[in-house]
Image (tube, rainbow, N blue to C red):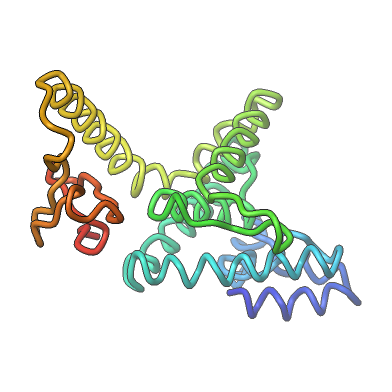
Amino acid sequence: MALFQILVFAILRTKPEFAGYLDLDGGKVLNGEVWRLLTFLFVPSTGSGSVVWFFFAAMFLFFMADALDELMGPFRVTLYVLFFLVTQWVAVLVWPEVLGKGMGGVGMFISNLFFALAVLSPRTELRIYFVVPVQIRWLALLDAALLLYFSLMKPEMAPGILWGLLPFLVMFVPGLVKQMRNRARVGVRRAEFKAKSVPESEAFHRCKVCGRTDGANPELEFRVAADGEEYCGEHLPR
């Protein structure tokens, strides 16, 4: 998709009106311009503006696509994208007066990808302007805060924003909630462990697959999976 955005951006630099032939317009789709059901994703979120901003946006899109393909697998990524497309089609074809007022289009598509990556790999570092390292989870929280701000400032946009995030809310939020509950259970176990005054040398975390512990391997990171068991980073189920 990023390659198509590069091509469209080059065209928009000389013919800004070209975006009007690609936007997702429900009325024009119903009149036969069905290509708009897909081509709206090819319009850069930066429009025909700064080349520098577009360069960063395109690089970021390439990065997210590659990372999600590795973390989710091609099939789940395709399903995620199709889910988003369907929500956008419904918004403009079925209930445009309500759902069509949100921040749809490629901007919301990027937010869905961004939030998914933040859930799957929260400690991944991005370098702002190739200099300042920031973990992706903090940037995702900032993005969420901005969307909440827009929803509060313009309540008529709230249903569209929430609808645009439906793929993320359905495919990732339930697992995220479950993971948070599992972490809470681990916190309780840790508190009980300390209360019993177990020697610090005794391991607290143990991988269910390989049996390695945090005592013998302090460099390992352990997480609780959806099944409630602990795994090291190498054997964490995906």
Up-down relation of residue 18 to residue 87 (above or below): below
**In the figure, is residue 20 to the left or right of 119?**
right
As drawn, the residue found furthest toward the right would be 14
| Picture residue at 51% right of the left edge, 37% below the top | 162
| Picture residue at 72% right of the left edge, 66% below the top | 56
Q: Is residue 129 or residue 97 the one in the foreground?
A: 129
* Residue 221 image offset from top left, x and y in percent: 29, 52
Quadrant of the image occupied by residue 237: bottom left
Question: Count of labels shown?
Answer: 0
Look at the image and tell me in which quarter the C terminus lies.
bottom left
**In the figure, is residue 32 to the left or right of 68?**
right
Look at the image and tell me in which quarter the N terminus lies.
bottom right
Q: Is residue 223 or residue 54 the one in the foreground?
A: 223
Quadrant of the image occupied by residue 110: bottom right
**In the figure, is residue 63 to the left or right of 52?**
left
As drawn, the residue found furthest toward the top would be 195
* Residue 85 image offset from top left, x and y in percent: 49, 59
Q: Is residue 222 or residue 43 the one in the foreground?
A: 222
| Picture residue at 13% right of the left edge, 26% below the top | 193
| Picture residue at 24% right of the left edge, 64% below the top | 234
* Residue 172 image offset from top left, x and y in percent: 35, 47
